[in-house]
Image (cartoon, rainbow, N blue to C red):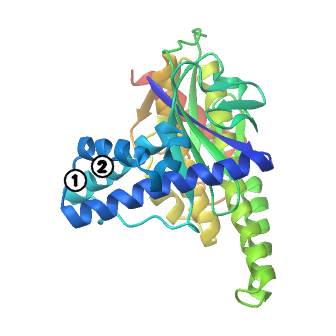
Amino acid sequence: MEKGLKIRLYPNKNQISLLNIIFGHARFVYNYFLDYSKRTKDYKYTNWSKILTDLKNSDSTSFLKNADKFALQNSLRNLATAYANFFSKRTNEPVFKKKHNEQSYRTNFTNNNIVLYENSIKLPKLGNVKCKYGKDIQKNKIISVTIKLLKSGIYEASIIYECEEMMLPKTGNSVGIDLGVRKLITTSDGNTYISDLDIDRINNKIRKEQRRLSRCELHSKNYNKQRKKLAKVYQYKDNYMLDTIHKATKAIVEKYDVIYMEDLDIKDLIKKQKLKIHKRKMLLSSLGQITTLLKYKCECYGKELKKIERYYPSSQTCSNCGKTYKVGKSETYRCPHCKLIIDRDYNAAINILNYGLAHN
Ligand SMILES: [Zn+2]
């Protein structure tokens, strides 16, 4: 099974100038063959590949010899894919790559040319580049790495690696999970993961930087500086949330063999709440990621994810006496029948587990 991992790179000055050269070469090749295919209507990768060899051997373009050879080949492959998508009407026609847009190239693993260490990654032509979060996949076989310079000025590597199915030890435990907007995940044994306070904290930061940007004179030096800063906060938000969701979902599949959750319409769940647009968007993507990653991790680690019927009233039912009661918007469930007082999401999670166990 192939998996992907994104890590942030911290290249030194020398590596930055080398990276600029490789980005430039990869872009040159892409644009050269885009122009060539537009003129000649020759869209064949194998033909392009032959011409690329000629280019490397001709005087005016012999600089290409110095580039990471996989980066150039992959530029051609990307162009071929872009055309394939265009011809099958999935995307627009490929366009020329520009220097001021996001820069990237992809390199492939061969003969240990790429090695991941705990705090650095060895890459062809660049040597060891400082990075974060290397240790998770050190033992896995790397297939390819895409190196990117994002608009925010951040360097990033997306690593594709082979992962053998890693069965996690069975624990004999089952759990019910309630997804919500205040606490994103609540489990039937009373644990909560990811609260909306995290989301508010990051959204406030974004709003603050946006306000600062709106006070800058358009396209002034400060404006550009502030725009980069804002892009960085957005980047931080994506990384932080994804990282938190990865950790939470991993913790859950480690702890339980069978995970029950409601077959939710996330859009519908969020629509019912009065939320600011930033928060709405963030919740929509976060809850989506939680469901996707839970499903994926269960498959990967040999655990089971079971969905229970969408219209089961998990938050209206008392987990103690089983009678139903319309709870309204309150965060606490107070049962008028048996006098139980319990957190609303915790109550729902217990009901989901009980329903799941009873209907299997
Ligand atoms: Zn009750």
| Comparing labels 2 and 1, the label whose residue is closer to the camera | 1
Choose between 294 and 2: the one closer to the eye.
Answer: 2
Q: Where is the N terminus found, in terms of image quarters?
A: top left
Q: Which residue is mark 2?
A: 80
Secondary structure of residue under mark 1: loop
Does residue 127 show up? yes
Q: At 25% from the left edge and 41% from the top edge, which residue is drawn?
A: 46
Choose between 338 and 187: the one closer to the eye.
Answer: 187
* In this picture, residue 19 sits left or right of residue 226: left
In which quadrant of this rendering is ligand 1 seen? top right
Q: Where is the C terminus found, in terms of image quarters?
A: top left
Q: Looking at numbered disc 2 in the image, what kind of residue is underneath it?
A: Ala
The answer to whether residue 32 is above or below residue 357 is below
Residue 42 pos. (x, y %): 19, 55
Residue 243 pos. (x, y %): 68, 41
Does residue 324 show up? no
* In this picture, residue 153 sits left or right of residue 306: right
Q: At 42% from the left edge and 34% from the top edge, which residue is drawn?
A: 307
CB under 8 Å between discs 2 and 1:
yes
Q: Looking at numbered disc 1 in the image, what kind of residue is underneath it?
A: Tyr
Residue 70 pos. (x, y %): 47, 37
The disc at residue 257 is none
The answer to whether residue 267 is above or below residue 184 is below
Choose between 132 and 115: the one closer to the eye.
Answer: 115
Q: Quadrant of residue 95?
A: bottom left
Choose between 249 and 331: the one closer to the eye.
Answer: 249
Q: Which residue is mark 1?
A: 43
* Distance CA(mark 2)–CA(mark 1): 7 Å
The answer to whether residue 341 is above or below residue 102 is above
